[in-house]
Image: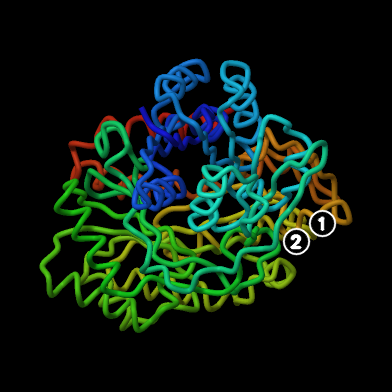
Amino acid sequence: MAEIVLVTPPVTLEERYGKLSGAANTLPSLGILYLAAVLRKEGHPVSVIEASSLRLSLKELIGEIINNKPKYLGISSTTLSIFHASALADEIKNIDGNIRTIIGGPHLTAIPEETMELFKSFDFGVIGEGEETMKGLIHSLKHGRNGSDVSGVICREGDKTVRTAPRKFSDDLDMLPFPAWDLLRDFPNKYYPPPFRFKKLPAVYIVTTRGCPFKCIFCDRSVFGNKCRGHGSEYVLELIEYLYNRFAIRELLIEDDTFVTFKKRLIEVCEGIIRRGIKISWSCLARADAVTPEILNLMKKAGCWSISYGIETGDEDVMKFIGKNITIDKIEQAVRFTKKAGILSKGFFILGHPTETRDTIKKTIDFALRIPLDDISVSMMTPFPGSRLHEIALQYGEFENNWRKMNELNVVFIPKGLTENDLEGYSREFLKRFYLRRSKITNYIGRIIRNPKSFPLYIKGFSAFLKGITS
């Protein structure tokens, strides 16, 4: 039994990844694990259920929740999963109306009033960074209050919703306990990254910074804000050692937007991994203007084997329009530096930007083929609630504001002058022309040979790729 149950909604892998569901990522999300750790530290019995990763149906998830006999149910939801979150809350309320339902995550944070108005089965919403707000809300409710005395909350008073004062972002992230991975069922063996995004298993996500100062129009920064805040290097090193020793984790996927931006801390972390003899491999995200040959060489020595760059487009004018504030030449330089350091590079690309044309898409594909990238990811421009693009999308094309389709693979925004068939066709062409080259096929065969234990996952990934380029 648990006083508080924290869950992710039961979104299917097909809904999240479409034709690429065979190459799906089932690593646990960190948000509810931080919440669980903070609430447990306060003395609350907590249970965590990662429904999507465990492939639980709605019925199965409801059964597990009810078996815990909770007083509070916390649901972390994205835009894609918000209807699943609502369906879950509806069913729980039908079974036991005394259970308080609390919704959080990026969708609620971006549009709190609209979310609470549309989905009546949510009793409370936690807006933004959730740890302190959730802790305060539970304390308020346990003492007979209604949550309106807690910053960062949206709650109900009769037929109205009431939004409290915003909560300030915490600058001292080192006060947070480590995420409660130990509360996950069968962790880490039931949870896998996508094929070809790891060298070793078991693997796990970590995030060491919050906030991003950059102004890309397609990003929603409402949860963590624009100010960069990071854990100290000692905290990060202790976290890595904890995962290495407690769970035998051998691969880290560092998902920070700005991990490489904190240069001094990055150097301290890399030198600490080397000095402590932690034999772990890791990958990260980086802006192309944040890396130097010296930094890349140090990262390589510390176990970094892959860096993903948000390239988005190969057209300078589109790059300026989306607020990326970087040049094509700088991106090419970073990719070449990365290759020289012996680190693989992956490029994230988006098709269907506002002002996008057939010519700009062709320039993007040609650019990706010209530079020495090892992998690519191709997604569709998606105007998420909370992003600048969501506000201006209709000025630049057709926008289907359908939350159920917003997995970044479905076409929901079509720039003027293009069609849905155009975007889907160019996506298939992009993947075919990039991967069906002799050098890439040879590279992937080599990666499979070097990691034979992961052969079944690689076969799944290859099957998903074939489905993606042929249908």
Residue lying at 66% horizontally and 36% vertically, measured from the top left? 123
Residue 391 bears which disc, if any?
Answer: 1
Q: Is residue 301 left or right of residue 411?
A: left
Circle 2 Cα neighbour tier, 10 Å, few/some/many (<14 / 14–19 / ≥20): some
Q: Position of residue 32 (x, y in %)?
A: 45, 45
Residue 388 bears which disc, if any?
Answer: 2
Picture quarter containing residue 456?
Answer: top left
Task: Evaluate if marks 2 and 1 touch, with contact meaning CB atoms under 8 Å apart.
Answer: yes
Element type where label 2 sits in the image: helix
Q: Position of residue 17 (x, y in %)?
A: 53, 35
Front residue of this view, candidates 293 and 40:
40
Q: Is residue 109 left or right of residue 50?
A: right
**Is residue 243 something one can see in this rendering?**
yes
- Tell me how far mark 2 sits from mark 1, CA to CA: 5 Å
Q: Is residue 425 above or below residue 251?
A: above
Q: Position of residue 241 (x, y in %)?
A: 19, 60
